[in-house]
Image (cartoon, helix red, strand yellow):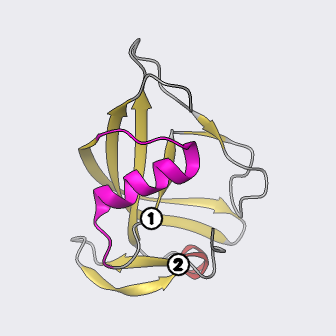
Amino acid sequence: MSRPEEEQVVLVDRDNRPIGASGKLRAHREGWLHRAFSVFVFDERGHLLLQRRATGKYHSGGRWSNTCCGHPRPDEDLRAAAERRLNEEMGFTCSLRPLFEFRYRARVGPELEEHEHDAVFVGHFSGTP
């Protein structure tokens, strides 16, 4: 896996139109609006699969989170990016469907800010991650 300063995110305007790309870490330091996704996977009983973020993450390490989240790469389809990241983070794949999109801005550290146009996907999986 690449380091945050090497990973590229898609910068967007307020209408979610691409306006460029940036390193992920720089986008979070500058608070630039960029694309992201959040994945919520449920089992057959309707339980949400959560993950605990790795303690070494550059922000929010050790905190509980949704099944997985991330950023599409430039020129990467959003659903394909969500499916890729789900497999990278949790070691399985499942069909994902888009649920809704929203924009938010939040401080996640003394010098880091998430300013994201976030697409939420939902899926179902009954195996063991």
Locate residue 107, reporting x and y percent.
60, 61
| Labels 2 & 1 near each other (Cβ < 8 A) | no
* Quadrant showing the N terminus: bottom right
**Residue sitting at the far right:** 55
Crowd around label 2: few <14 · some 14–19 · many ≥20 (10 Å): many
**47 relative to 98 in the view: left or right:** right
- Compared with 8, 61 (above or below) is above
- Look at 27% across and 72% down and name the residue there: 14
Determine the secondary structure under disc 2. helix
Determine the secondary structure under disc 1. loop
**56 relative to 6 in the view: left or right:** right
- Look at 38% across and 61% down and name the residue there: 81
**102 relative to 59 in the view: left or right:** left
22 vs 73, nearest the viewer: 73
Figure quadrant of residue 51: top right
**89 relative to 126 in the view: left or right:** right
- Look at 32% across and 71% down and name the residue there: 76
Prevalent SS, magenta region = helix
Locate residue 115, reporting x and y percent.
46, 66
98 vs 83, nearest the viewer: 83
110 vs 127, nearest the viewer: 127
Locate residue 101, reporting x and y percent.
27, 52
Label of residue 71 in the image: 1
Q: Label 2, on which residue?
A: 27
Crowd around label 1: few <14 · some 14–19 · many ≥20 (10 Å): many
- Compared with 78, 40 (above or below) is above
Q: Nearer the viewer, mark 2 or mark 1?
A: 1
Start-end of magenta stretch = 75-95
